[in-house]
Amino acid sequence: MPRRIVSGTAQISPEGGRLLRRRHFLASLVGVGSLALLPRRPRADGREVRFGLTPVFLNSDLELLTRLKAYLTASVGQPVELVMRRTYQEITALLLSGYLDAAWICGYPFIQYQDRLSLVAVPVWRGQPLYQSYLIVDRKRPVAGVSDLRGDIHAFSDPDSNSGYLVTQALLTDAGEVPNTYFRKTFFTYSHRDVVRAVASGLAESGSVDGYVWEVMSEIEPDLTSMTRIVRKSEWLGFPPIACAKALRGKPTTERIAQALLTMGDDTDGRQVLDILRLDGFTPGDDNLFRGIAQKYDQVRRLG
């Protein structure tokens, strides 16, 4: 059900993406820098609060980033640096290392490292902290279901994405199949928006995409999404959460970040951020929200 927006012009990479991701692992910071002139009250440790964003986030929208940075800075009471990377793995690594105070990640890495991560908040979209994965094809393609996608060139978003990879992987595993043999070719776009673009342009015959992203794109880029059609929607799954390293849970900075998110709808500037994101707000959530993702992860590990 998520309505997340994706990065604008991610470079499309071949399925050998895992090797490429490691080549870029812990690359130089691509933070947003000083997007607005904000009061800066230095932390005791001399650094800004670092809030990470994965490519699942609408990180191509300068207005959104500026407003989010301003809102968090004012609400947390300390300068906030927005830290972005090209892949989920890079942000997850920075989060696990303690470099980031918190980050908006995906439910898949949250499950993978649940013993080392804690929930800070979970977005609420259309009344629930849930979303779906969509399988999409060209709008004119006469297919009825997943079985018609065998032999396709298929676009995934990221190897650590739940909606953009794990859901489809688990679906095929349940049928005794794996993506590399079920599809003629697969590749990662490292952007949900670019999965839609790949299918719409004919670069891919089908794709796995975040349903929240597709739905928000249908509002702001209808000419693009109208060139695709949804073949299958997954069950509802836990919306990509904001998480922190377990060692930082309960720390004053982490608690202020959580409070800023949970009360975002009570603030004029916060509501503007939520409006851009098409979100209702944030909830504390709990780990049970991600049981469905955990089951898919266990299924793939057991049968894959």
Image: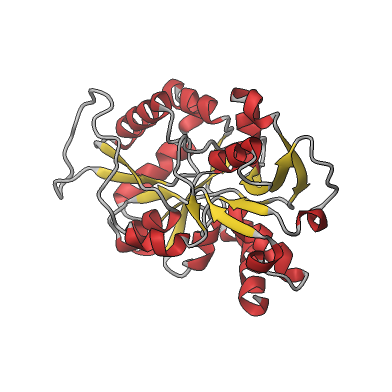
**Depth check, front residue: 286 or 49:** 49
**Depth check, front residue: 155 or 97:** 155
Left or right of 29 on screen, residue 217 = right
Is residue 245 shown to the viewer in this render?
no
Q: Estimate the x, y position of residue 136 in percent, counting from the top left.
A: 71, 44
Q: Estimate the x, y position of residue 150 in percent, counting from the top left.
A: 76, 59
Residue 78 lies in what quarter of the image?
A: top left
- In this picture, is 26 found above or below 56? below
Quadrant, the C terminus: bottom right
Write the residue at 43% across / 36% down: 59
Is residue 110 shown to the viewer in this render?
yes
Write the residue at 57% across / 60% down: 287
Quadrant, the N terminus: top right
Residue 193 lies in what quarter of the image?
A: top right
**Depth check, front residue: 22 or 286:** 22
User: Which residue is outermost to the bottom?
Assistant: 302
Q: Estimate the x, y position of residue 39 in percent, counting from the top left.
A: 21, 27
Write the residue at 19% across / 31% down: 40
Q: Estimate the x, y position of residue 175 in percent, counting from the top left.
A: 78, 69
**Depth check, front residue: 270 or 234:** 234
- In this picture, is 35 found above or below 285? above
- In this picture, is 78 found above or below 20? above
Residue 195 lies in what quarter of the image?
A: top right
Write the residue at 55% across / 60% down: 108
Left or right of 62 on screen, residue 182 = right
